[in-house]
Image (spheres, helix red, strand yellow):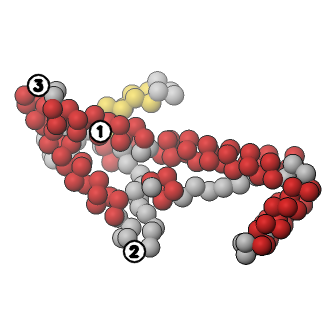
Amino acid sequence: MSTGKGDYELTVANLATGRFFETNPRNVGGERDFNRIEIEGHPPDALEQMLAGFEADAAESIRRTGESRKFEGDDRRNILNLMALLVVRSPQMREHIRKHHERLMKMMLSLTLVSKQRWEEHEARMIAEGKGPPAICRQIGRAPKRRLRGWRVMEVTQEQLQL
């Protein structure tokens, strides 16, 4: 809803507390630099620039659908694609994916550490391939398996989630 001053307000529901309140979309609808990437040869806002054209088309589709009251054709496709994008590109979904990657990495690591022999074979392969082992790998190789449960094994970068 517009207050008539050029700014808009949303009615927001906090499902965890059951509380409703009105606020500006900027207060609840964004995270600074959420789409920022750090990939060599690309500007940090490259993804944002690519999404801008799509979002402009979707905004126009929403406007046309509101005027015509017809939800069909390219307008329907643009609106549904925007809805899908909003669902998967949220901080909550990013954290869900990060946790999934972390669980997989911990499983792979626990398989590598299932026995001293397996770890030594893995370490020898890394050395033969010229990949290490880095100091953290030597620490992991000496750690009792039970201690790995609390380790945060992997950080998933924005670039890994976006590509």
Q: Kindly report the distance in space between the C-alpha atoms of the residues bearing marks 2 and 3.
A: 44 Å
Q: Position of residue 11 (x, y in %)?
A: 31, 31
Which residue does the image show at 58% across and 48% down from the upper left? 98
In the rendering, at what x and y percent does residue 135 appear? 79, 71
Specify the label residue 81 is tagged with: 1
> Image quadrant for the N terminus?
top left
Residue visible at 73% across and 75% down in the picture: 130
- Name the quadrant containing residue 119: bottom right
Q: Residues within 10 Å of mark 2 (few under 14, many from 20)?
A: few
Residue tagged 2: 41
Up-down relation of residue 132 to residue 96 (above or below): below
Q: Secondary structure at mark 2?
A: loop
Q: Amino acid type of disc 2?
A: Gly
**Residue 95, image quadrant:** top right
Along the polypeptide, which appears first: circle 1 or circle 3?
A: 3
Instruction: Give the amino acid type for the residue marked by disc 1 in the picture.
Output: Asn
On the image, the x and y values in percent for residue 63 come to 13, 37
Mark nearer the viewer, 1 or 3: 1
Horizontal arrangement in the rendering, residue 123 relative to residue 64 (left or right):
right
- Quarter of the picture containing the C terminus is bottom left
Residue 54 relative to residue 17: left or right: left
Question: For mark 3, what is the residue?
Answer: 69
Q: Is residue 12 above or below residue 24?
A: above
Q: Is residue 54 above or below residue 45?
A: above
Q: Nearer the viewer, residue 123 or 20?
A: 123
Residue at 50% x, 41% y: name it: 92
Alpha-carbon neighbours of circle 3 within 10 Å: few (<14), some, or many (≥20)? few
Which amino acid does the dot numbered 3 rest on?
A: Arg
